[in-house]
Every structure is written in structure tokens, then in C-alpha cells.
Amino acid sequence: MTNFVELFEIMEGWGMLDVMLPFLLIFTVVFAVLQKAKIFGDDSKRFNVVIALVLGMVVVIPHIIGTYPEGQDAVLIINNALPNVALVLIAIIMVLMLSGVFGYEAKGAGGAILIPAFIVIIYIFGVSAGWWSNFSWFNVDPDTMAVVLVLLVFGIIIWIITSDGLLKGVKPIKGLFGKKE
């Protein structure tokens, strides 16, 4: 093994992409949600670990043994959707960073940003699962669609930041531009 490419090829041969990463992702998300929700009480860490472990296995094992119906393999849908979700997430973070550089705190914009982001993520997962394949508008080149989505997210976030009514109570960061304190 002389470089990282070979290392990742070996790890892929071990099932890293198809087994380990989806399992760890599902386990972590389920465990974090259960810990935050405290469904089983404050001392429920052991229960939460077991439930997250079982749910991670329930998703990954049918993929390994090939029992998912055609087009409904959860691991393949996750592996297809996550790069696009990461792209949108990076775009949102970049817009928030730029707005912070120019002196705005996005405390009041949480819900306004959350709804379009949620819609975009549902769309991305729908494309990855093939839900929109019958609609002609959705048969666009994936690269073009990624650019359109990034521009749409940027546009929505800029609209939210610049509109008067949505960010009431959001104050510029003092001392960044203008008078120093």
C-alpha cells in the first residue's frame, strides 16, 4: 500500500461503503435522537445503544444479503443521497459564514432556513430513491440539478437575510464594521 487511493480501495473491498459507514451513520443518528428525546428516561443510555444498534443492523443486513426489493435498498439510497445533501449543507454553511462576515447573526432565521432546507433534502432523497423519475422536469442532468439547487438555496437564504420581516430582532455584530466599542 503506497497511497490513500489503495487504502480506500482495500477498505471498499472490506465493505466500508456498503456496510460500515451506513451502519455507523444510522447508529449515530438514532442514538443521538434517542439521547436528546429521553424517551426512556434520563438513565436510558444502555437502551438507546441497543435500539440504535438494532436499527442500524435492520437497515444494513438486508442490503448485505440482498433481500431489499428492486429500487428500495436503503443503503443505496443513503449512499446516493448523501453527497448531494452534503453539497447543499456546505452551500448553506457558506452562506451563513458570509452573512456572519458581513455582520449578521442568524438567530431569528432558523425556521425560515429550515423549511427550504428540509424541502431540498426531501427532493434529494426522492431523486436518489427514484421517486421523481416519471416527471419530465426531474430528468435533468445531475450536475445541472446540483448547480440549480445550490443557486436556489443561495437565493432563498439571501432573500431571507435581506427581507425586512423575516429577521426581526437580528442585530449586526457590534464592532465588525463601523464604530469600534
Image (cartoon, rainbow, N blue to C red):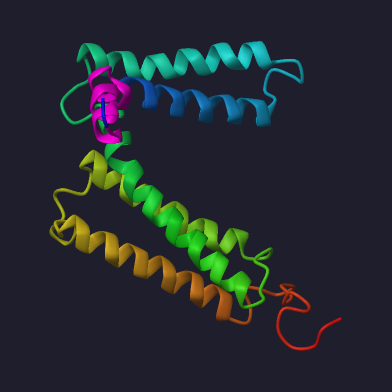
Front one among 13 and 105:
13
The quarter of the rendered structure image containing the C terminus is bottom right
Percent across and percent down for residue 128 are 25, 42
Percent across and percent down for residue 22 are 37, 27
Left of 93 or right of it: where is 138? Answer: left
Left of 16 or right of it: where is 29? Answer: right
Q: Is residue 42 above or below residue 5?
A: above
Q: Is residue 123 above or below residue 34?
A: below
Magenta-span inclusion, residue 154: no
Please count the marks in the image. 0
Dominant SS type (magenta): helix
Q: Is residue 43 above or below residue 6?
A: above
Magenta-span inclusion, residue 6: yes
Q: Is residue 74 above or below residue 181?
A: above
Q: For the point 61% across and 73% down, which residue is it? A: 101
Q: Quadrant of residue 33?
A: top right
Q: Residue furthest right?
A: 181
Percent across and percent down for residue 129 are 25, 39
Q: Residue furthest front?
A: 2
Q: Residue furthest bottom?
A: 178
Q: For the point 25% across and 35% down, which residue is it? A: 5
Q: Quadrant of residue 9?
A: top left
> Which residues are drawn in magenta?
3-18
Left of 136 or right of it: where is 47? Answer: right
Left of 20 or right of it: where is 137? Answer: left
Q: Quadrant of residue 60?
A: top left
Q: For the point 53% across and 62% down, which residue is it? A: 113
The quarter of the rendered structure image containing the N terminus is top left
Percent across and percent down for residue 164 are 62, 82
